[in-house]
Image: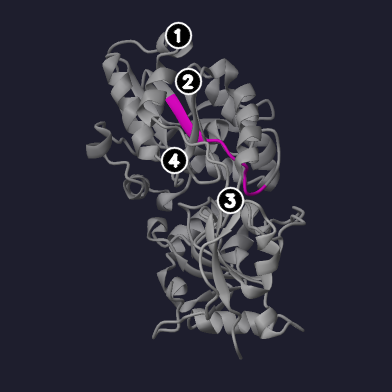
Amino acid sequence: MGFPKIIKIKQNFPDHQLQDIRATVFAELEKEEIRTKIQPQMKIAITAGSRGIANIADIIKYTVEKLKSFGAEPFIVPAMGSHGGATAEGQKGVLHSLGITEEYIDAPIKSSMEVVQIDKTDDGLPVYMDKIAHSADGVIVMGRIKAHTDFKADIESGILKMASIGLGKHKQAQAIHTFGVYGIRDLMPKVGEKVIHSGKVLFGIGIVEDAHEHTAVIEAIPPEKIVDREKALLQLSKTYMPSLPVSDIDILYVDEIGKNFSGTGMDTNIIGRIRILGVEEPKSPNIKYIIAGDVSEASHGNALGIGLADLTTERLFKKINREAMNENVITSSFLARASIPIVLKNDREALKAAMRANWGVRDEDTRFVRITNTLEIQTLYVSESLLDEVKKLDYVEIVGDLKEIQFDEHGNFVD
């Protein structure tokens, strides 16, 4: 069996990068509707999630710096539901892996899984908040606003999700995810609104990234405007979203899956797979087989999303922390996403197996794409069979020459 030749390409997506993160954070916190909410000696909790958000450590650091200049006493609370193995130390460890440390932020990180019930929704769902955050004089809910990987709605992933599933810890995550997609699509925003309007939240900070994973928007939003602004920023975020250069693919190889790339390990908006009971699969992209090569170190063995792949490697399989992954997937109730696909010895064997099952397609005609992860798809490899298609795209640049796929002595891809 032979393998298709590949070539490196670059997708030149529009760049909306903010030029000065610190100046932007300072300007947002100096807005009158924000500045007036901060008083000297106020103990203010700032939420920090588990996602790999661009510049997140800096954004938090500059927020802390500005709050201190107002005389406030800020600290950080992990807001990540059941992530980090649903333990206080585990969640603090996740923050450390993202560069959010007490030394760098210059503020304490106070981690606990204890919550207090602050309200309930109109249909009786309890609303919880991190106990430490609730004891503060005020809370700043910070989150990246983007398309969710499980559903489509006016409110998807953003401030309200951080306020509900994030700040509500494992207990709130379980309560919401018990209802499946209805829980995260319909109940999550209701819980989030209860938290936002509880009197404890001073304001939110919404972050939007462009297709390059650059920070494009940082906006401080008072509680009464969060719902409307989040809806608007979600639509803006969707216009910035990257995509694969072709929609029909025989085999997609993903170097790494991981929680730092997407809450589902692989972004379902990129790969066109959701795999949730009762949720219709996207019509595009159409990918026959997905190979997951490895799991990121930042995921600490939580290989949630492996179930979105059809094949994987022994090196990924051996790194799986079942306790962390199972806790996360059982909490979400989307069990298929932790299902282990066919495990092959290495990349070469995984690719051979996928090509074997690619019926009626000659080896050299395989429509093959290789990406680093689903968060970074600007630079990637495509097979020779896709070259004519991608050359027609005005935003695609050919940055390499056609070459044979190379494997190392262990049978894994050589870059």
Mark 4 or 3: the one toward you: 4
- Residue 402's disc is none
Left or right relative to 42: residue 17: right
Q: Dot 1 corresponds to which residue? A: 32
Please say if 202 is above or below 320: above
Q: Residues within 10 Å of mark 2 (few under 14, many from 20)?
A: many
Coordinates of residue 404 in the picture (x, y in percent): 52, 81
CB within 8 Å, label 4 to label 1: no
Q: Secondary structure at mark 3?
A: helix
Q: Earlier in the sequence, mark 3 or mark 2?
A: 2
The region drawn magenta spans 140-150
Q: Dot 4 corresponds to which residue? A: 49
Q: Secondary structure at mark 4?
A: loop
The residue lying furthest to the left in this view is 103
Q: Dot 2 corresponds to which residue? A: 203
Q: CA distance from mark 3 to mark 1?
A: 39 Å
